Amino acid sequence: MIRIPKINFPQLKSKLQVKSPWDRIIIMLLSVLITIPVFIILHQNLIDLRWPFNIDRVIIFLFVLACFFLILMYLRTIIIVCIALYLLVLVYGSVFGNYGFNEISEDYNSMIYTMSDNPFPQDIIVAKLLPFPNKSKIINAIEYQDPKVRNFAIMATTEHFKGIKGYSDYRTIIQCFAVFKEINSHWNYVNDPKEGDYIATASESLQYFSGDCDDHSILMAAAIRSIGGTPRLIHTKGHIYPEILIGSLIDLEKVNYLIKNVLFKRESYKKKLHYHIDERGQVWLNLDYTAQYPGGPFMYEEILGALTLN
């Protein structure tokens, strides 16, 4: 005979008792923050019963919220300590580091916005949980305020596309394409040491235009940002490459014409542009070291993480 263990409700009740009203408020807020993305995943994957006023979805949300609330209340001592430590880390990041309260708020809002308009929202969670490799080292290596990096970017704008007229609204993008042309026409791929990743700074890579994919991405991002462009780095399986913000789909039409008919006619002949559209509808163009023109083919399609440099 199988014995079903009895639930000691008084003991469970005692564990859920609240020592301070702030405990309940903090736990409820955390429960809501966790419930929202989980609810989006369930909403996208469960069959819609088409009940009046979407009552089935309301029930799902309340059920998930209640489950998380009970679990967090049961573990409230550990949770409160973890939250306190996390807040200290965010305070430190806001004052001295690169990641604080503003950044985590933007990341959360961005994640929710993207999940709500994605047929596979669970993939967004996975991508957010995966860390960007060597993030802090890469950010420090993107020396866009270094005079050597900026002077190099300025030199590139005088070497390429200086005489292009009639596209004043896209002058910065054209100059960033000049940087792309200068770097990619000289780049020499060299592996890292066997012992592990070697993160070269942008100024270091300027000496020989050599390194692996993260070194190329760092130099490209630093040079582009030094002249007013907006770059970001994309992490895929075993690879990192840079992209540049083009703007809207309307801007993409103009940039597409510029690349194929003015700036990179030979390199892009009968070829298409490769780009990504983010959760805000903004277009990012591929600038990988393997590309012969801005928007060249991707080496890997699946995005595991993105590091935007505002």
Image: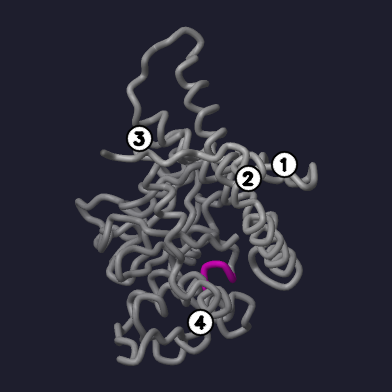
Vertical comparison of 77 with 98: above or below: above
Residue under the image location 39 percent in, 12 percent down? 50
Separation of marks 4 and 2 at Cα, in angstroms = 48 Å
What's under tag 2, amino acid-wise? Answer: Met
Q: Is residue 211 magenta?
A: no
The magenta region covers: 222-226
The N terminus lies in quadrant: top left
Separation of marks 1 and 4 at Cα, in angstroms = 49 Å
The answer to whether residue 272 is left or right of residue 43 is: left
What's under tag 1, amino acid-wise? Answer: Arg
Callout 3 environment at 10 Å: few (<14), some (14 to 19), or many (20+)?
A: few
Residue bearing mark 1: 24
Residue under the image location 73 percent in, 69 percent down? 92
Residue bearing mark 3: 119
Q: Residue furthest front?
A: 1
Q: Which mark is residue 202?
A: 4
Q: Which mark is residue 223?
A: none
Callout 4 environment at 10 Å: few (<14), some (14 to 19), or many (20+)?
A: many
| N-terminal-most mark, 1 or 3 | 1
Q: Are marks 1 and 2 in contact (CB under 8 Å)?
A: yes
| N-terminal-most mark, 1 or 4 | 1
Residue under the image location 39 percent in, 64 percent down? 235
The answer to whether residue 258 is left or right of residue 144 is: left
Judged from the image, the secondary structure of the residue bearing numbered disc 1 is: helix
Separation of marks 3 and 2 at Cα, in angstroms = 32 Å
Residue 148 visible in this rendered orientation of the protein:
yes
Separation of marks 1 and 2 at Cα, in angstroms = 8 Å
Residue bearing mark 2: 73
Q: Are marks 4 and 3 in contact (CB under 8 Å)?
A: no
What's under tag 3, amino acid-wise? Answer: Pro
